[in-house]
Amino acid sequence: MSNSSSLTQFLLLAFADRRELQLLHFWLFLGISLAALLANGLSAIACDHHLHTPMGLFLLNLSLTDLGCICTTVPKAMHNSLWDTTTISYTGCAAQFFFFVFFISAEYFLLTIMCYDRYVAICKPLHYGTLLGSRACAHMAAAAWATGFLYSLLHTANTFSLPLCQGNALGQFFCEIPPILKLSCSHSGYLREIGLLVVGAFLFLVVFFIVFSYVQIFRAVLRIPSQQGHHKAFSTCLPHLAVLSLFISTSFFAYLKAPSISSPTLDLVAAVLYSLVSPTVNPLIYSLRNQELKDAVRKMMTGCFSAARDCLLPSANNSQCVS
């Protein structure tokens, strides 16, 4: 038995005991992280340099939150699998906890704002420029980041002020709220954190706004007379809704489920789905399916290849490459 004042480290979940499986997990995490970094990096660069629309701004911010989620959790998991360890320092756990909650909360609010963007674009196209001007979009994106920061700060300050007397094994591959709460021996502190989660649940009642928005979007789409218009709208909205539903349902399960239905396997699957899978597939669904963004990425890559070719080929202008 120990308390939080004497804890210097936590024990994270070990995916396997055999060395071969640990290395397999390392390579799997490496592949996921590289795919996420490549997709989100291309999306962020293309949005930043080539798109100046509200959706381009939101996609840029979404890519940044996805990159933050991946870079917060995956490197430590890869390190532990490669070096056959499960430890993380108390300070490192607090930092990982803060940044993960920060990025995941900001992503919630950004996805809600993007849903509102689609709602206005399809249901109120004549008012789009008025409701979603450049200044309004910048304010909404800043509000999403600020709210995520405040929410994360409250959770981190409260969680790591609780006395811990149930050991230091978290049972998860990164520092998350529910595993740390299980180590607490303070009933009042536990209730205080539950109160914060309830506040968060009320904040995430925006989910009902998302449902309402998509209902209105589908009603507007069904009024489109052409079948081609139906297909184009549904092919865009349905993948968005599927990924958003996966992200929200798994994260709600991880944080708000009843203790009676908790199990290590279910907790691990839910954590992987909302912390790894969603940030990896988001750019494929939201960004790289956008024709303007695909054209921007193609143009950017063509320019890079052309510049590299000009530098490699013997030419009188090669001196420019050096400079």
Image: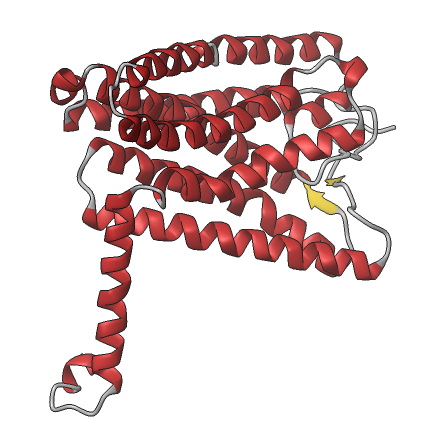
Closer to us: 319 or 212:
212
Residue 316 image-quadrant placement = bottom left
Q: How many marks?
A: 0
Please provide percent x and percent y for residue 184.
75, 20
Residue 235 visible in the displayed image: yes
**Which residue is located at x 78 percent, y 21 percent?**
262
Closer to us: 91 or 258:
258
Task: Locate the C terminus by quadrant.
Answer: bottom left
Whether 191 is drawn above or below 307: the answer is above
**Which residue is located at x 45 percent, y 9 percent?**
208
Residue 195 image-quadrant placement = top right
Please provide percent x and percent y for residue 65.
42, 37
Residue 237 image-quadrant placement = top left
Answer left or right for 217 relative to 123: right
Please provide percent x and percent y for residue 301.
28, 63
Answer left or right for 4 relative to 303: right
Figure coloring: secondary structure
Whether 57 is drawn above or below 310: the answer is above
Task: Locate the N terminus by quadrant.
Answer: top right
Please provide percent x and percent y for residue 182.
76, 22
Residue 185 visible in the displayed image: no
**Which residue is located at x 67 percent, y 38 percent?**
90
Answer left or right for 244 relative to 131: right
Answer left or right for 219 relative to 225: right
**Which residue is located at x 29 percent, y 50 percent?**
294
Whether 36 is drawn above or below 138: the answer is below
Whether 117 is drawn above or below 56: the answer is above
